[in-house]
Amino acid sequence: MASAQPLRALNLKAFDETRAGVKGLVDAGVTAVPSIFHHPPESLAHGAPRPHRFTVPVINLSSVVESAKRAEVFAQVRAAAETFGFFQVVGHGVPEAATSAMLAAVRGFIEEPVEAKAPYYTRDTGRRVRYQSNLDLFQSTAANWRDTLFMEMPPAPEELPAACRLVAPEYARLVQQRLGRTLLGLLSEALGRRPGHLEEERGCLDGVSLACHYYPACPEPQLTLGTPRHTDASFLTVLLQDAVGGLQVLVDLDGAAAWVDVPPVAGALVVNVGDFLQLMSNDRFKSVEHRVVSNGVGPRVSVACFFRTDRAAAPTRVLAPIVADGDQPQYRSATVEEVVRQYYKVKGLAGVSALQHFRL
């Protein structure tokens, strides 16, 4: 009789070789979640959340150009970054036509026949565009109930699936130039620097990538997760989500950590601080853990836009803390490549931050 580990390895290989992802399982009519997707009970905690009054802030950025109201918007963004690390924005300048088209393009691609998607299915991280189910399928202790199309911008047009060829680069450009520039300007000022500091001198907008997630309806959502608890290896992440829901953030409620829903808000984009910016802000801004729970309804479609460093610059781009007068640095300086390497080394260890390795 085969032992559990070799059998699991065989099941993972068989699943990956279908190139059909979780969507393929659902299309085949599975009524039970395969064991490779079973997460340990302690990581699930699908039970009813404790009563609380916490809500993720929703900030209207449309007033940021009005001098009379700019101070109020600035204070809201600074407070959200310093306390929760998560907030939603409306009035962000990314048209509804662009967000709707982006969600439709992702859904259109993932719902194409397997043979149409197969050329994009790869585990070669050297490719700028790759479709797969679970980046760490063969390393993680449990697979997640989702499929992903990842696009490192800007790829050559022929590298992109036809469904996304026109839509994805334009959406990424709008998020980067309209929302990203605005947010990084406000956060630069919150750190006592001029508005262009984080973008121009620290390279926080130099690299943009899109992780487009498709979470099919799950027959046994209590057994698995769409995305386990994690922080982001980014400066900022901007998330576009549809109306299904499932995103949760870990917050401190009266001294106890609790998962809180980040409910979809019509027209809003979700923003969270990443590990790079927590280090660079010298702990002023908080990169907090979040996850996506599985759902009996779906699919849920989301698009995470990561502000990172251009891949070619990662070995030399240095992340150094911005230290306010009278304060002490909380971290040693490190290259983006070093931080990313440590991020993947501790990935999957609940509650363990890659930043601890660089703390002084």
Image (cartoon, helix red, strand yellow):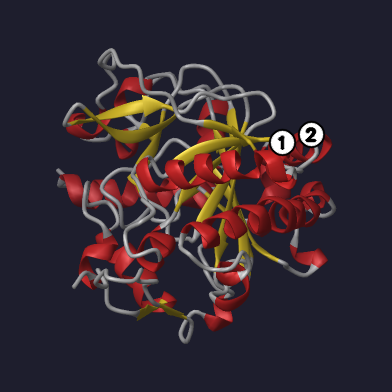
Q: Nearer the viewer, mark 1 or mark 2?
A: 1
Residue at 46% x, 84% y: name it: 315
The answer to whether 211 appears left or right of 46 in the picture is right
Alpha carbon separation for disc pair 1 and 2: 10 Å
Q: Which of 311 and 13 is in front in this view?
A: 311
User: Measured from the top left, where is residue 225 in percent x and y?
Assistant: 37, 33
What's under tag 1, amino acid-wise? Gly
Residue occupied by mark 1: 91
Residue occupied by mark 2: 96
User: Measured from the top left, where is residue 217 in percent x and y?
Assistant: 51, 23
What's under tag 2, amino acid-wise? Glu
**Mark 2, other Cα within 10 Å: few <14 / some 14–19 / many ≥20:** few
**Mark 1, other Cα within 10 Å: few <14 / some 14–19 / many ≥20:** some
User: Measured from the top left, where is residue 331 in percent x and y?
Assistant: 27, 72
Residue ranking furthest to the bottom: 316
Helix, strand, or loop for circle 2?
helix
User: Measured from the top left, where is residue 355 in percent x and y?
Assistant: 28, 64
Q: Earlier in the sequence, mark 1 or mark 2?
A: 1
**Which quadrant holds the N terminus?**
top left
Residue at 81% x, 65% y: name it: 158
* Residue 357 drawn above or below residue 95: below
Q: Nearer the viewer, residue 82 or 103?
A: 82
- Quadrant of the rendered structure where residue 324 is? bottom left
* Residue 344 drawn above or below residue 36: below
* Residue 267 drawn above or below residue 305: above
